Image (tube, helix red, strand yellow):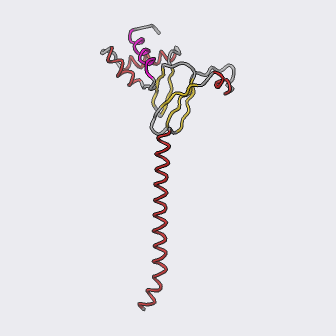
Amino acid sequence: MRNTLQRAAVLNDLKHRSDHPTAEMVYTTVKNDIPNISLATVYRNLRGLAKDEEIISFTQNGKEHFDGNTVPHVHLCCKSCGRIEDLMLTKESFEKMDFPEDFLVRNIVVEGLCKDCRQKLMASEASDMSDVSDIEEINSDIEEIKAEEPEKRAVNE
C-alpha cells in the first residue's frame, strides 16, 4: 500500500490514542485535519495498515477496533459496557503461555466484566435477592391466611 497523506494521518491518529477506536471514531478525528477524507478512505487505510502489521485490528462486541500499539499485549474487553483496556505483559509472561514456536502472537483478546459492571451485577443480584425475600414473605402470609380460613368457616357455619 502506498504512503499517502490520508494513510499517514490515520496512522498518526492511532499512534496518539489509547481508546481502541472504531473506524468511525478515527474518521471523526482525522476529518478535522483532512476535511475531504471519506469514511471509505479511512476504512481502506485501516485495513491496509492492519495487513501491513503497522496497527492491530480486532473485533469486540460486533465492532472492529484498531490499536496503534503493536507491542504484543492483551486487550481486556468488557462484554457488558464495551470498555477495552490494555494489559501489558513482560516477554517472560508471554513465553510462559507456551504458544507453538511457529505461532507469532501479537494480540490476545480476553472477554469478561470490568470492575464497574461486576459491581452493578452484584448490586442487581442483591436487589433480586430482596425480591425473593419479598416473595417468601408474601407466600408466608398466604399460608397464614389459608390456615385461618378453616377456622373462619367453622365459626361462620
Q: Residue at x 45, y 82 (%)?
A: 149
Q: Magenta segment: does it hold 131?
A: no
Q: Residue at x 50, y 43 (%)?
A: 118
Magenta region: which residues? Answer: 5-17
Quick one: which residue is furthest to the bottom in this view? 157
Name the spot of residue 42 as percent of width and height, x first.
40, 18
Q: Is residue 115 above or below residue 36?
A: below
- Count of residue discs: 0
Name the spot of residue 2 as percent of width and height, x first.
45, 7
Residue 19: name its quadrant.
top left
Most prominent secondary structure in the magenta stretch?
helix
Q: Residue at x 46, y 81 (%)?
A: 148
Along the viewing direction, whichever of 100 and 29 lies nearer the viewer: 29
Residue 44: name its quadrant.
top left
Q: Is residue 134 above or below residue 9?
A: below
Quadrant location of the C terminus in the rendered image? bottom left
Q: Residue at x 46, y 33 (%)?
A: 83
37 relative position to 8: left or right: left
Name the spot of residue 26 as percent of width and height, x first.
39, 21
Q: Magenta segment: does it hold 11?
A: yes
74 relative position to 62: left or right: right
23 relative position to 103: left or right: left
Along the viewing direction, whichever of 41 and 146 lies nearer the viewer: 146
